[in-house]
Image (cartoon, grey):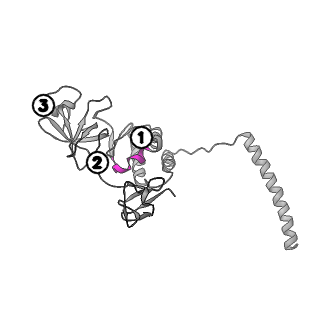
């Protein structure tokens, strides 16, 4: 097994040379330093299943305006550190006295982390075509460390969610997910997101969630019909098995005796 759920302080391996992120070495053994999923393939590392978001440059995130100062919006980014959106990083020129007209306390934004200095001053921007205030839809909070599971390998999970729910879904690196679509479709997406978060450690999760969504929608998973050649081979195999069973039955009759 390449992955397993581990607790803080749990023994993982004797191979200290492979110890990586989320682990510590003591007395020539590798232990988990966090509660999470241990990956034992190649380098040993543990991905935490809980914890706060730690921002880094280049992260696309969803923030909530929590305060307005003379020249900055103070932004809640689900981190121990606030984000700072300077007035010059708004996509149009505005005056300080107009700041609340464009972004007020409680408003949500899709934003980009442009810099994080050594003192953890987190600078944000809206100066990018991808970025904008969030005016519609719903925002759901999930554990930041589980974000890769919501995206899936090569984007498989997020692609499936969009296809099955008919919603537009953006997953911020800080564990905020923005959903837009029809109300009933957004309800479906939220249910799936909550189930994914609960079952992050389960293998084959994309298939499980696909089945879950189809069951809610009342759809049946259509199994592939065998082609004519495959069907013919199956029938021939069945006849062969039947003949073998008859032969076996005759031999057993001889061994056990005729009880008729």
Location of residue 67 in the rendering, given as x and y in whole percent from the top left corner:
16, 42
**Which of the marked residues, 2 or 1, is nearer the chain's N terminus?**
2
Location of residue 14 in the rendering, given as x and y in whole percent from the top left corner:
45, 64
Quarter of the rendering containing residue 135: top left
**Residue beneath label 1, please?**
185
Is 144 displayed left or right of 257 in the figure?
A: left
Could you give the CA–CA distance between mark 3 and mark 2, rounded to whole angstroms? 29 Å
Q: Nearer the viewer, mark 3 or mark 2?
A: 2
Could you give the CA–CA distance between mark 3 and mark 1, rounded to whole angstroms? 40 Å
Give the secondary structure at mark 2: loop
- What residue is at 60 percent from the left and 44 percent from the top? 222
**Is the stretch drawn in magenta largely helix, strand or loop?**
helix
Give the secondary structure at mark 1: helix
**Which of the marked residues, 3 or 1, is nearer the chain's N terminus?**
3
| Residue 54 marker | 2
- What residue is at 40 percent from the left and 47 percent from the top? 193
Q: Which residues, given as a range, are shown in magenta?
A: 141-151
**Residue beneath label 3, please?**
96
Q: Is residue 179 above or below residue 236?
A: above
Give the secondary structure at mark 3: helix
Report whether residue 110 is seen: no
Q: Nearer the viewer, mark 2 or mark 1?
A: 2
Quarter of the rendering containing residue 86: top left
């Amino acid at each position: 097994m390449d992955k397993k759920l581990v607790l803080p302080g749990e023994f993982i391996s004797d191979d200290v040379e492979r110890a990586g992120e989320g682990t510590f070495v003591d007395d020539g053994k590798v232990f988990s330093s966090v509660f999470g999923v241990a990956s034992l393939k190649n380098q040993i590392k543990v991905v935490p299943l809980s914890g706060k978001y730690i921002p880094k440059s280049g992260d696309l995130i969803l923030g909530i305006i929590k305060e307005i100062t003379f020249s900055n919006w103070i932004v809640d980014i689900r981190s121990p550190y606030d984000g700072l959106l300077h007035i010059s990083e708004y996509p149009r020129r505005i005056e300080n006295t107009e700041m609340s007209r464009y972004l007020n306390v409680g408003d949500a934004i899709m934003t980009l982390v442009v810099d994080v200095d050594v003192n953890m001053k987190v600078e944000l921007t809206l100066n990018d075509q991808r970025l904008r205030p969030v005016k519609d839809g719903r925002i759901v909070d999930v554990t930041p460390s589980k974000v890769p599971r919501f995206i899936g390998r090569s984007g498989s999970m997020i692609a499936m969610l969009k296809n099955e729910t008919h919603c537009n879904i953006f997953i911020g690196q800080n564990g905020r997910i923005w959903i837009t679509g029809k109300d009933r479709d957004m309800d479906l997406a939220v249910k799936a997101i909550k189930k994914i978060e609960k079952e992050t450690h389960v293998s084959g999760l994309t298939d499980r969630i696909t089945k879950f969504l189809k069951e809610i929608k009342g759809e049946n998973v259509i199994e592939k019909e065998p082609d004519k050649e495959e069907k013919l081979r199956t029938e021939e195999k069945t006849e062969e098995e039947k003949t073998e069973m008859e032969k076996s039955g005759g031999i057993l009759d001889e061994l056990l005796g005729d009880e008729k």
